[in-house]
Amino acid sequence: MHEMSLVRTLLAQVGEIVSANGGAALRRVRVQVGPLAGVEPALMASAWKQLSAEAGCGDATLEIEEVPLVARCRGCDMDFQPLQFRFRCPSCGVPETDTISGDGVVLQCVVLDDIEQGAST
Ligand SMILES: [Zn+2]
């Protein structure tokens, strides 16, 4: 399953952030998923449930934000949402575009609970 390997990659990324912060508890992870990522959010959520538990952060929540596909025209720099994956600029007709959002899974934010340095006292 495609989602399993994506979540594994994600957990490795998150794990680095966690250890850079002194092993604080992981609370929440938010990712943006675009239509070209080929991700089924429900499958990704269940992959997260399983793999985060194995990684010892089973209490952490994964938020999946589905974002639209956005392309930028190389001719006139206009951003547009390609319809039916037609990457041709609606303004100047140039077929050369760069995908600026929606082509993958992007780690957006990580929320840690800083137990070590908590300000509760
Ligand atoms: Zn253009």
Image (tube, rainbow, N blue to C red):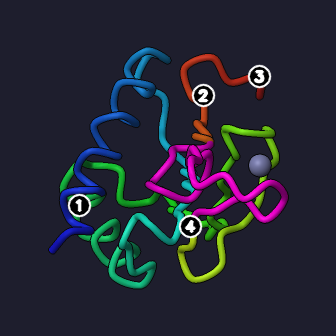
Q: Is residue 49 left or right of residue 94?
A: left
Specify the label residue 64 is tagged with: 4
Q: Is residue 61 left or right of residue 39?
A: right
Q: Which of labels 3 and 1 is toward the front?
A: 1
Q: Which of labels 3 and 2 is toward the front?
A: 2
Q: Which residue is mark 2?
A: 114
Task: Tell me the SS state at disc 1.
Answer: helix
Q: Quadrant of the C terminus?
A: top right
Give the residue furthest to the front: 93
The earlier-in-sequence mark between 1 and 2 is: 1
The earlier-in-sequence mark between 4 and 2 is: 4
Q: Which of labels 1 and 2 is toward the front?
A: 1
Q: CA distance from mark 3 to mark 1?
A: 31 Å
Circle 3: residue type: Ala
Location of residue 119 in the rendering, given as x and y in whole percent from the top left corner:
77, 22
Specify the label residue 25 is tagged with: none
Task: Tell me the SS state at disc 4.
Answer: strand
Q: Which residue is mark 1?
A: 51
22 falls in the magenta region: no
The stretch of residues the image draws in magenta is 87-108
